[in-house]
Amino acid sequence: MRNTELVLSKFSLGVGDRFAHQAPAQLKACRQAADQGFEVIPVWNKSNREHLIVGSKPDSVRAAADEAVRLAGWTKPYHVDADHINLKTVDGFLNSSDFYTIDVADWIGKPAEPAAVAAFTARHPELSGAASTAAKYMLAIQEAGQVYRHIKSRKAGVPFITEVSMDETDSPQTPPELLVILAAIADEGIPIQTIAPKFTGRFNKGVDYVGDAIQFEKEFSDDVAVVAHAVREYGLPASLKLSVHSGSDKFSIYGAIRRVLRKTGAGVHLKTAGTTWLEELIGLAEAGGDGLALAKEVYAEAFAMSDALCAPYASVIDIDAAKLPAPAAVNQWTSQQYVAALRHVPGCPEFNLHFRQLLHVGYKVAAHMEGRYLDMLKQHREIIAKNVTENLFDRHIRPLFLEA
Ligand SMILES: [Zn+2]
């Protein structure tokens, strides 16, 4: 398949910026990597769900990215990802995005036409025993094709990057299943550059990986081999690579990813730092005074409405309500206490992953504060930016790509 689309660079980071104020600080972390001779491309992503909760529009992500790039004089590529779109939601992203993550998880396991499955297995004698996998994923892949062709026709010649995501489903895809999926995607004529499978283990929002890191390394390595094989065998774009929808901050598998990438020479797209808004809260707390007061207010409000805030994220958070500090206690905290409880330093005794997860899904609270929250971001811009950049560089880019 000839790739007439935009070509995604070998290493790319999908980053979130809920309130569209941190793109310059995030870009600075990529600049720091470039200064060390390592090219990692930023991709700003925001799903329809986030837009609905924050009350923002896709165009705002593009505007923030363009402005950050202009201010920084960044001359390398960057992209804006319409994250987890489908046929119903994609149209709002057609102007602003040049990267589309087509989410077909809802179609996995739905019955496909037996004739389509039979045609697939006949076309692919090399994939022995693929019939049940093909039957499970065929409808999802046909749907991805429909969404891809819809985008292509609406973009009318404007190039874009296509990802297919299957991560928001119950069971992981094994490497042999991934090969069948990629063969079917090639047959469907989708020039995908990133594929996001669901990996084994828990990928909860904003906290570390829960699972067997050694098994993950084996699976990730096998998936990388499958991707390389599918590129050769089925003519998928040479830039095709895995996309890891990490849910942010999967520190304990960064070493595994780094080793596999080094060993194989493969690239990766890693979506992380959707927690950037927590760096805003950390910066505000660190600032003390009105900043700390606002950070406490956000927690108290999130605590009060925790059931409603957690509901849309129920499958990707594990909060033990008994381990959440009472708002009255938090109101007595110093800057240092608030920061230590929230900042993601897993070994730190004061770090509280329940507090962190609740605040992470609590961005709706800040969104409802509207101007009051955004004014505070502006007022404490520098201390927040420092946290955003350090987080992305020290806790993500460095361990993933730069460590020996
Ligand atoms: Zn995802």
Image (tube, rainbow, N blue to C red):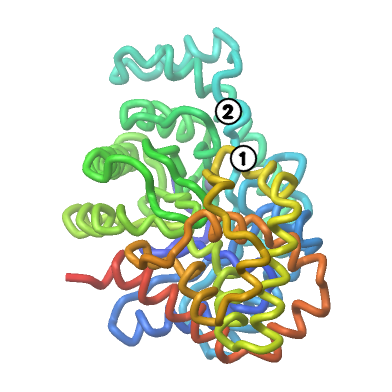
Q: Residue at x 61, y 55 (%)?
A: 358
Q: Residue at x 37, y 70 (%)?
A: 395
Which amino acid, mark 2?
Ala
- x, y (%) of residue 152? 66, 48
Which residue position is annotated with label 2? 140
Answer yes or no: disc 2 within 8 Å of ligand 1. no
Q: Secondary structure at mark 1?
A: helix
Q: Quadrant of residue 234?
A: top left
Q: Secondary structure at mark 2?
A: helix
User: Which sits in the foreground, 318 or 237?
Assistant: 318
Q: Is residue 4 visible?
A: no
Left or right, 139 with respect to 258, comes to: right
Q: Is residue 168 visible?
A: yes
Vertical comparison of 177 with 379: above or below: above
Q: Residue at x 61, y 67 (%)?
A: 329
Name which of mark 2 and mark 1 comes first in the sequence: 2
Q: Which mark is residue 278?
A: none
Which amino acid, mark 1?
Ala
Answer yes or no: disc 1 within 8 Å of ligand 1. no
Q: Quadrant of the N terminus?
A: top left
Q: Which mark is residue 314?
A: 1
- x, y (%) of residue 198? 44, 38
- x, y (%) of residue 180? 39, 26
Vertical comparison of 346 with 190: above or below: below
- x, y (%) of residue 311? 69, 42
Left or right, 39 with respect to 229, comes to: right
